[in-house]
Image: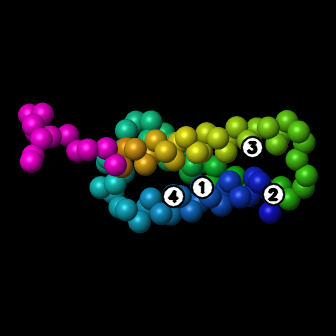
Amino acid sequence: MPCSSALRDWAQGFLYGFGLAGKRAAQRLSVEGREALQDFYEIAQLEVDAGDLAEDEQQALTEIEEYMRVAAMLVYEDMHAPADREGGHELH
């Protein structure tokens, strides 16, 4: 399986898993997190060619892979950030 189809399939799986969390999960995302999900959606729609990739295309895929890694961590951080407390007080 070429790397491009693996990235596409991973993006589809990530979106499927995130979708299982429902609308409330999406509301917790920052603007950057929502943009990352939109980018994953666009990557998941890619049509991939089974042929060999040129060196510059392989480099571009490596950059996309790195972006997806960082974007997934951003979404994770958004989902695990503490909820804003009313008045700035923590409950003990």
- The kind of residue tagged 4 is Leu
Q: Residues within 10 Å of mark 1 (few under 14, many from 20)?
A: many
Specify which label sits upstream in the sequence, 2 or 1.
2
Magenta stretch holds residue 53: no
On residue 36, the disc is: none
Secondary element at tag 4: helix
Task: State the residue lying farthest toward the front.
Answer: 92
Residue 70: where, in percent of width, then height? 55, 40
Which residue in the protein does label 1 denote?
Answer: 11
Closest to the observer: 51 or 88? Answer: 88
Does the image show residue 42?
yes
The CA span between labels 2 and 1 is 15 Å
- The kind of residue tagged 3 is Leu
The CA span between labels 4 and 1 is 6 Å
Residue 73: where, in percent of width, then height? 49, 45
Specify which label sits upstream in the sequence, 2 or 3.
2
Find out whether the residues at labels 4 and 1 contact each other: C-beta distance under 8 Å.
Answer: yes
Side of 89 where 38 appears, left or right = right
Image quadrant where one finds the N terminus: bottom right
Secondary element at tag 3: helix
Closest to the observer: 47 or 3? Answer: 3
- The kind of residue tagged 1 is Ala
On residue 2, the disc is: 2
The CA span between labels 4 and 3 is 19 Å
Side of 25 where 89 appears, left or right = left
Does the image show residue 45?
no
Which residue in the protein does label 4 denote?
Answer: 15
Q: Residue at x 51, y 58 (%)?
A: 15
Magenta-highlighted residues? 80-92
Which residue in the protein does label 3 denote?
Answer: 61
Specify which label sits upstream in the sequence, 4 or 3.
4
- In which quadrant of the rendered view does residue 6 lie? bottom right
